[in-house]
Image (cartoon, rainbow, N blue to C red):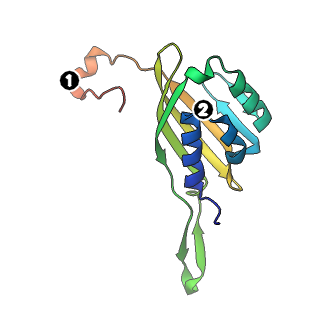
Amino acid sequence: MAEPSGREIVERYAKAMGENDLEAMPFLLADDMEELYPQSGERITGLDNWMALMRRWPEVDAVNARLEQIVGSDDEWVAGPGWSLLRIAGTGDQFWVSGQVTYANGDTWHAVMLLELHDGKIRRIRSYFAAPFEAPEWRRPYVEQMSPEA
């Protein structure tokens, strides 16, 4: 059986996050993985710490993650001069995922995760979370109002 592609790994991760499937994570995340939360200045280092944190997250079963869009593609190979194969780097190991997270109190926030893969597992995650807010009145003549889910 062929090894899963980078995109397949990220798709499995997004599905597992949406289903709160922590049992799938050791197959998807590297042992030396890290997740960064730049907004709060936190770094989670190592799969063991990440798993312990997720298991202790308040009301983890009530959190609903809908990671809806995955951007990135697998590495590509092209024929170069003399028909030698060249790898187009920078595409197959970096992805971003966006969606929404609904917390136990009913608040729904936007989420964006930048993921880097190494040796067939997710090695680094940089996660950003943003609460929705009302657009200022002065911008209304210049913009089209989208639904909050867009």
Q: Quadrant of the C terminus?
A: top left
Return the disc, 1 or 2, that comes first in the chain's sequence: 2
Left or right, 94 with reference to 118: left
Determine which quarter of the picture holds residue 148. Answer: top left
Q: Is residue 58 above or below residue 69?
A: above
Left or right, 150 with reference to 144: right
- Residue pictured at 79% horizontal, 34% vertical: 48
Q: Where in the figure is residue 28, as x and y percent of width and height?
A: 67, 46
Residue 32 seen: yes
Q: Residue furthest top?
A: 105
Helix or strand or loop: what does disc 1 sit on?
Answer: helix
Helix or strand or loop: what does disc 2 sit on?
Answer: loop
Task: Determine which residue is flagged by label 1.
Answer: 141
Q: Are marks 1 and 2 in contact (CB under 8 Å)?
A: no
**Label 2 neighbourhood size at 10 Å, few (<14), some (14-19), many (20+)?**
some
Q: Quadrant of the N terminus?
A: bottom right
Q: Which mark is residue 120?
A: none
Q: Where in the figure is residue 80, as x and y percent of width and height?
A: 55, 79
Determine which quarter of the picture holds residue 38. Answer: top right
Which residue type carries mark 1? Answer: Pro
Q: Where in the figure is residue 110, as x and y percent of width and height?
A: 47, 28
Residue 46 seen: no
Q: Where in the figure is residue 40, as x and y percent of width and height?
A: 64, 21
- Residue pictured at 55% horizontal, 23% vertical: 63
Q: Residue furthest left?
A: 141
Q: Which mark is residue 20?
A: 2
